[in-house]
């Protein structure tokens, strides 16, 4: 039987910093030895985190720092060419990313704080 992966928790922000469909909080994660930008937003009460990288061209989604939602508040939008993503899953819902989605990151929320869950090394 394979051993369960150990998850490390890293604090991203306080829960109150994430308002429903409001500005996201940016942070960084290490991927293959390189720091990559990431963000977390609140949608339908839940915190959702993704790498801050459009699936079309690897640019960051937010043009104005922390602005990830479109005007409707229903989608995450890439400010560069307008690709739309489902905030709950990161799936592409239209635009130039051709069905590719955002890279989701695991988060948890406990006692007023939002944590990134990363596999232990
Ligand atoms: S870079 Fe995001 S839609 Fe083109």
Image (cartoon, rainbow, N blue to C red):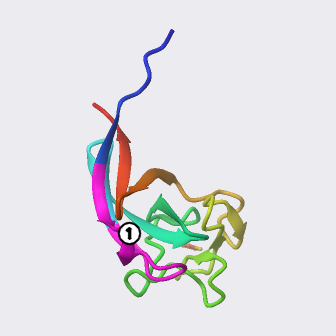
Per the rendered image, the range of residues in magenta is 10-26
Specify few, some or many for label 1: CA neighbours under 10 Å numbering under 14, 14-19, or 20 or more: some
Q: Is residue 79 placed above or below 101 in the rendered structure? A: below
Quarter of image, res 33: top left
x then y, percent, for residue 117 = 38, 46
* Residue at the image position 46 percent from the left and 79 percent from the top: 19
Q: Taking the image as drawn, is residue 35 in sight?
A: no
Q: Identify residue for label 1.
A: 15
* Residue at the image position 59 percent from the left and 80 percent from the top: 81
* Residue at the image position 63 percent from the left and 74 percent from the top: 83
Q: Is residue 65 placed above or below 87 in the rendered structure? A: below
Q: Is 90 a magenta residue?
A: no
Quarter of image, res 52: bottom left
- The residue furthest front is 111
x then y, percent, for residue 102 = 56, 59
x then y, percent, for residue 26 = 35, 70
């Amino acid at each position: 039987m394979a051993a369960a992966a150990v998850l490390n928790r890293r604090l991203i922000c306080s829960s109150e910093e994430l308002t429903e469909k409001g500005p996201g909080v940016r942070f960084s994660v290490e991927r293959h030895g390189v720091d990559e930008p990431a963000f977390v937003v609140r949608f339908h009460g839940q915190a959702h985190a993704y790498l801050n990288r459009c699936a079309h061209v690897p640019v960051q989604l937010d043009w104005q720092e922390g602005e990830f939602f479109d005007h409707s508040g229903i989608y995450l939008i890439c400010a560069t060419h307008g690709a739309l993503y489902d905030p709950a899953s990161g799936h592409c819902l239209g635009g130039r990313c051709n069905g590719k989605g955002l890279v989701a990151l695991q988060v948890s929320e406990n006692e007023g704080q939002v944590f990134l869950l990363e596999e232990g090394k």
